[in-house]
């Protein structure tokens, strides 16, 4: 069976009551803890089922794991890293960065690892969240979900998987005990993870079959090692790194019209991508197989300079025939061909359109957030709050993901919003804030209206869309617009409950 890599649960002493409980210790949870502490709130706890900080960067340890956002943008604004070794950082380097930031932040004593979030129920009488964890119960006034959108592996429903017999694991739960050298390996998927894994393992394996359902758009990766003098300059010249970061940020923001207003602008990028294919692949049949048949940008644009060269190697086959089922030691495609495999790597992505944590959170009406979202679609005011779920804040909530720039910028915007909310609640003596249903609906209508013109709505199947075809993942404007809209907690959009218990309008 597939090893989902659930972390072992450890008994850790938890305080019974905290002001703020944060679930998840990735960029979101760590950034939130640091911001709360900087704002004077020390009474918080961050729990994570893993063994250390890092979130997706802790979990995705597959060979070749590298960030596809430039290094200069991929750090907290308050902790720039002049030490990045390359223009696109690798997973180990990002994980080291997070460890370093965490260690110097002074907040790690309020992190509990190996503790799984099992559920939370809103206690209206006491105006707090009653939270169950694998290490016991905790009550908290504010509950912050920093569990991430790309944390739950999505596994394909393949008939015969139980009979396969060989090693099977998901890209985000890499089984490092498995030797790949000299073995026959099958990779399912050709998304952001697979296109990094395949070139990274190509040199070791005896044979590699890559099962492609949809050919992605892949632009060349302009990656290079920073020279020693560049790193020295970033360290020593005041403001230099911030200036570089600003320039990279502006360059990324300039891409937004191509995604949200004029998909035809993607024509130039698609020429570059097709040239990327021609440069690396001589075989016309293989060129045809890797040629995408949807508008560039509709799915996440991938970047790689070694994906196509890897596919052109003799011992690698790109299989475009759909997988029919598995049998002992082989993957069988719809045309009846059985390709032997010792190891099956499942790079089929994540349950991003669901936010699995929603199944575990029960709000004012006694219904879980998953039940509410099943009826209305996954949506939230400013990607952060949902009617019926007072004092619950999301980081990387609905429609806050970016297709063009750094998620850390969005996370910092959402952290600022919730820290301001908490500050205002204390200032005004509020026990609870619950977003007004009309405000949330108006926000979602605006997001979905804007979505209609975007390249993401041009007809492809992507993880951005839910089962009904609504884009519940991406933010359809500039990241700067999001920053402006979340700069202050807007109390008038909320129903506020004073600490004396009487309900009051915002
Ligand atoms: P993904 O982009 O969702 O790709 C999943 C791949 O698996 C797709 O090729 C998909 O085909 C295929 N697939 C899914 N179910 C399948 C099935 N039942 N049978 C056959 N093929 C199937 O997942 P991912 O590559 O893990 O990446 C997810 C996201 O994580 C990325 O978009 C990105 O945001 C992030 N990420 C970032 C980095 C980075 O920074 N370098 C690296 C990895 C991931 P279809 O296209 O036909 O659905």
Image (spheres, rainbow, N blue to C red):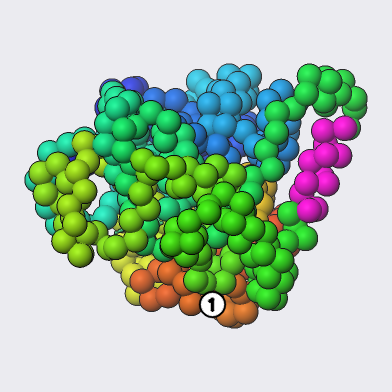
The residue shown at (19%, 57%) is: 337
- As helix, strand or loop, the secondary structure at mark 1 comes to loop
**Residue at the spot x=56%, y=23% of the render?**
96
Expressed as whole percent of the image width and height from the top left, the position of residue 77 reads: 73, 38
Label the magenta part by its dominant secondary structure: helix
The x, y position of residue 493, in whole percent, is 61, 68
Residue 305's place in the image compared with 265, above or below, is above
**Please, is residue 83 above or below residue 143 in the view?**
above
Would the CB of label 1 be found within 8 Å of ligand 1? no
* Segment tinted magenta in the rendering: 240-251
Image coords of residue 106 (percent x, y): 60, 21
Q: Which residue is mark 1?
A: 458
488 is higher (above) or lower (below) than 451: above
Left or right of residue 231, residue 369 in this image: left
Q: Quadrant of residue 351?
A: bottom left
Q: Nearer the viewer, residue 360 or 140?
A: 360
In the rendered structure, the answer to whether residue 49 lies left or right of residue 70 reads left
Q: Residue at x 67, y 59 (%)?
A: 272
Whether residue 58 is visible to the viewer of this picture, yes or no, is yes
Residue 188 picture location, percent across and down = 33, 50
């Amino acid at each position: 069976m597939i090893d989902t890599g659930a972390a072992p649960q450890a008994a850790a002493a938890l305080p019974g009551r905290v002001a703020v409980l944060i679930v998840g210790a990735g960029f979101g949870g760590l950034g939130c803890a640091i911001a709360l502490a900087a704002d004077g709130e020390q009474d918080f706890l961050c729990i994570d089922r893993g063994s250390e900080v890092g979130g997706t960067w802790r979990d995705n340890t597959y060979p070749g794991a590298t960030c596809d956002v430039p290094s200069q943008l991929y750090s907290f604004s308050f902790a720039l890293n002049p030490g990045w070794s390359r223009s696109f950082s690798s997973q180990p380097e990002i994980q080291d960065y997070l460890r370093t930031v965490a260690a110097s932040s002074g907040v790690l004593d309020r992190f509990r690892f190996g503790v799984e979030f099992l559920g939370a129920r809103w206690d209206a009488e006491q105006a707090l969240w009653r939270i169950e964890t694998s290490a016991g119960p905790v009550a908290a006034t504010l509950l912050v979900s920093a569990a991430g959108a790309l944390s739950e592996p999505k596994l394909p429903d393949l008939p015969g998987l139980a009979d396969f017999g060989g090693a099977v694991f998901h890209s985000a739960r890499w089984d490092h005990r498995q030797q790949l050298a000299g073995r026959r390996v099958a990779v399912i998927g050709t998304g952001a993870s697979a296109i990094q894994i395949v070139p990274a393992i190509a040199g070791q394996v005896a044979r590699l079959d890559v099962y492609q359902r949809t050919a992605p758009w892949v632009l060349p990766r302009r990656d290079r090692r920073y020279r020693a003098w560049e790193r020295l300059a970033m360290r020593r010249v005041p403001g230099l790194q911030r200036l570089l970061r600003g320039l990279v940020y502006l360059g990324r923001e300039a891409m937004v019209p191509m995604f949200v207003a004029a998909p035809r602008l993607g024509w130039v990028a698609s020429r570059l991508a097709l040239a990327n294919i021609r440069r690396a692949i001589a075989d016309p049949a293989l060129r045809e197989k890797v040629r995408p048949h949807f508008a560039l940008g509709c799915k996440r644009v991938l970047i790689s300079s070694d994906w196509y060269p890897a596919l052109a190697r003799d011992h690698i086959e790109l299989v475009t025939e759909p997988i029919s089922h598995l049998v002992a030691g082989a993957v069988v495609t719809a045309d009846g061909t059985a390709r032997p495999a010792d190891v099956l790597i499942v790079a089929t992505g994540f349950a991003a359109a669901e936010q699995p944590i929603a199944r575990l959170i029960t709000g004012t009406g006694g219904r879980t957030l998953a039940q509410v979202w099943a009826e209305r679609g996954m949506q939230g005011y400013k990607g952060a709050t949902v009617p019926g779920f007072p004092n619950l804040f999301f980081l990387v909530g609905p429609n806050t993901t970016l297709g063009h720039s750094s998620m850390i910028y969005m996370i910092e915007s959402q952290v600022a919003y919730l820290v301001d909310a908490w500050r205002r609640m204390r200032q005004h003596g509020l026990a609870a804030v619950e977003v007004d249903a009309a405000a949330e609906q108006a926000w979602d209508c605006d997001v979905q209206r804007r979505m209609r013109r975007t390249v993401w709505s041009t007809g492809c199947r992507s993880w951005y869309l839910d089962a009904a075809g609504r884009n519940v993942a991406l933010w359809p404007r500039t990241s700067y617009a999001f920053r402006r809209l979340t700069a202050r907690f807007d109390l008038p959009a909320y129903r506020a409950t004073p600490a004396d218990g009487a309900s009051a309008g915002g």
